[in-house]
Image (cartoon, grey):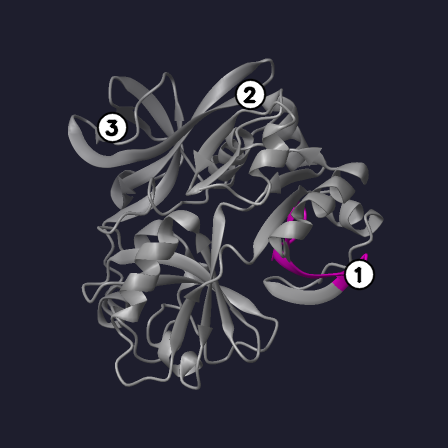
Amino acid sequence: MKTALTEKLAATGAPIKDYFGGETASRFGDTASELAALNGGCGVYDLGWRGKILVTGEDRVRWLNGMVTNNINDLQPGHGNYNFVLSAQGRIQADMFAYQRGHHIVVDTDRSQVESLIALLDRFIIMDDVELADATEKLTAIGATGPRALTVLRAAGFDPPEALLTLADSVWNSTGISIVRKTLDPVSTFEIWSAPENAAALWDALVAAGARPVGAESLEMFRVLSGVPKVGPDIRNKDLPQETEQKQAIAFGKGCYIGQEIVERIHARGILHRTFTGFVLDAAAAPGAKVESEGKPVGELTSIVAVPRDGSSTLLGLGYIRREVAAPGVRVKIGDTTATVAPLPFRFQD
């Protein structure tokens, strides 16, 4: 599915690929330079591969709070949080950010999840005054990441919020926008939400202010380096919330929601067999490859990227491993190669 920026980015000569449901630039040239911008400068990228769902109706807060793992009831206007949607057996069905907008809630998720997430949630609207609407074609976004992201945004005339997962409305060059702060220093991430027809002008302003265009290939490298799992490759409908190590997605003791009994039972008993971790591989392996220790299966590889480093490349992977062999530095076999277990996010000594 094309994003608001697909044609503009394609006109630069950038190859286009599907990234989690949206057609966007794969790269703009040297992926090593793009990754360096994300880590050390400011990278700007198309976020049209994210979708938006509007939740309206008088019962929206109470109802959505009963659907997800985090606390929607206590969200103040302009604030958001990260959530999982679970099955009754506690298995992850989807993930999303939810932002309280006063008269409605905005659900932000990958485009690849929008249709199935709406269908899943709609099944649980029984006698509730709740409506779900796909707003993906009406609201797009641009991302800016890096230690210089705040400086670049201010140079371009934007006024980003300071607190994590807050959303600030403002007017830029007579254009109404919203800015979300997704992560804090040292490598800050911001999102600029706007109507699709304004995306090109916003992109040009950020590039003119010093941001480096970044494609999906470098974004994927940065995601793995940061240790962030994605629904699809890393988070499947067989996985439990605590296994993903995304503690920010769970509000314990918040009240009833679908799958809560399983989540609370794991929390109370401290029984968890697998955990999400990183791997530094000696040679390539395919996602889905089994992880073995002393000849026994102990996990699986879910994502792998070749990250440019010191003139060559380092193979980094994400996946699951049994907790008893999850210590950093442990050597394991993955497929036909070997690897070292590494903590997340990945950190290297230069």
Residue annotated with mark 1: 174
Alpha carbons under labels 3 and 1: distance apart: 52 Å
Note whether residue 284 is visible. Answer: yes
Residue annotated with mark 2: 308
Q: Residue furthest top?
A: 311
Alpha carbons under labels 3 and 2: distance apart: 23 Å
Q: What's the residue type where badge 2 is placed?
A: Pro
Residue annotated with mark 3: 289
> Would you call the spot at circle 2 few (<14 residues within 10 Å), some (14-19), or many (20 or more)?
some
Q: Is residue 260 left or right of residue 206?
A: left
**Image x and y of residue 30, in percent:** 62, 20
Q: What's the residue type where badge 3 is placed?
A: Ala
Q: What's the residue type where badge 1 is placed?
A: Ser
Instruction: Identify which residue is drawn at 43% across, 49% down.
Output: 111
> Would you call the spot at circle 1 few (<14 residues within 10 Å), some (14-19), or many (20 or more)?
few
User: Relative to residue 118, is residue 14 depicted above or below?
Assistant: above
Where does the C terminus fall, quadrant-wise? top right
Where does the N terminus fall, quadrant-wise? top left
